[in-house]
Image (cartoon, rainbow, N blue to C red):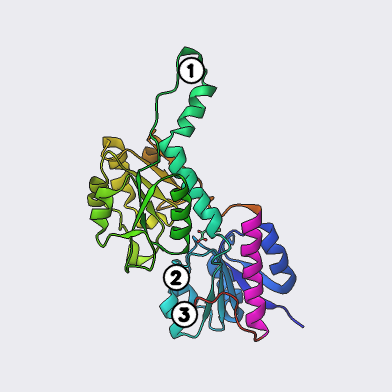
Amino acid sequence: MAKTPVLILAPLPDFLMQPLLAAYECHDYFHAEDKAALLAQVGAEIRGIVMSGGSVSPVPLLEQLPKLEIMSVFGVGYDGVPVDWCRANGIRVTNTPDVLTEDVADTASALVLMTSRRLIAANRFLLAGAWTKGPFPLAYALRGKLAGIVGLGRIGKAIAHRLEAHGMRIAYHGRTRQEVSWEYVDSLLALAQAADFMIVATPGGAATKHLINADVLSALGTKGTLINIARGSVVDEAALIAALQNGTIRGAGLDVFENEPQVPEALMQCDNAVLLPHLSSGTHETRAEMARLVVENLAAHFSGRALLTPVC
Ligand code: 8YV
């Protein structure tokens, strides 16, 4: 029997590509030099899409795939998928929630520690031989400080638990108050004013674009550090660079960027920022689980079984 044709919209690891290639006729749109030619050749037959959390599937592309039935996202964030359009057109969407929560939360708390204790600068200091000339400058303690979580979903909660273990106080802002013991702050600006660390854990997409803007950064102020493990789009990166350059805020710890993998040179020059290459879910264990969900969701769909982790 002929294999079902699927379109690959993002660079995917071998341990995901292998099972996909075994089961499907995979067409690599991401690496195709002539994308229009690829669509002209196979677009009419494509029944599935595989993409990553950060990748985008615009409606004009999807409109060229009349037999599309399912989009399987290798990531928890599906802000690159036009979900309303998919719903309206009967296209199923799946993602990979839960399996990455702990790793992403670990990365967020690592960024809190790296920025508060200036661990990357300390490492550079030692390697440069500066220790023999004197001690590394003192840093800031975490105990008693306020972590303001923006977006208290599964990942936000896992971050809060970790930071409590460091002796931090927790407050959060989101669309709604939740049944949790942490303090709810209904204004983002008020949370920024109070927080020593503001930790962004919201979904990406239009609803949260540039939620963290110049006003929020001013409110966060010189006592404050911004941590972002969510999506680059949530932070106005130009405003953040200005705030880091002018000392409006103390520092930033970022795993995501507005135009990644491009990171502005000006941001890389900020020695009060710790920058990571979007690695928060990047462990062998978690990525294997994410790959399993991508493959099993597709298999479930094409064999008429219930999806494991449906978005719609
Ligand atoms: C991944 C992510 O880096 O889950 C997400 O939404 O952005 C990340 O976990 C990405 O999807 C894998 O390429």
Residue topped by disc 2: 58
Quadrant in which residue 250 is drawn: top left
Can you give x and y, in whole percent of width and height, for residue 304 in the image? Answer: 65, 86
Residue topped by disc 1: 130
Residue 16: mark:
none
What amino acid type should be assigned to the residue bearing mark 1?
A: Ala
Q: Which of marks 3 and 1 is nearer the N terminus?
A: 3
Left of 191 or right of it: where is 58?
right
Q: Is mark 1 on a helix, strand or loop?
A: helix
Nearer the observer, disc 2 or disc 1?
A: 1
Q: Is mark 2 on a helix, strand or loop?
A: loop
Q: What stretch is highlighted in magenta?
A: 285-303
Give the crowd class for mark 1: few <14, some 14-19, many >=20 residues within 10 Å: few
Q: Which residue is drawn at 66% across and 73% down?
A: 296
What amino acid type should be assigned to the residue bearing mark 3?
A: Cys
Label 2, label 1: how many angstroms apart (C-alpha)?
51 Å
Relative depth, front residue between 186 and 38: 186
Quadrant in which residue 247 is drawn: top left
What amino acid type should be assigned to the residue bearing mark 2?
A: Pro
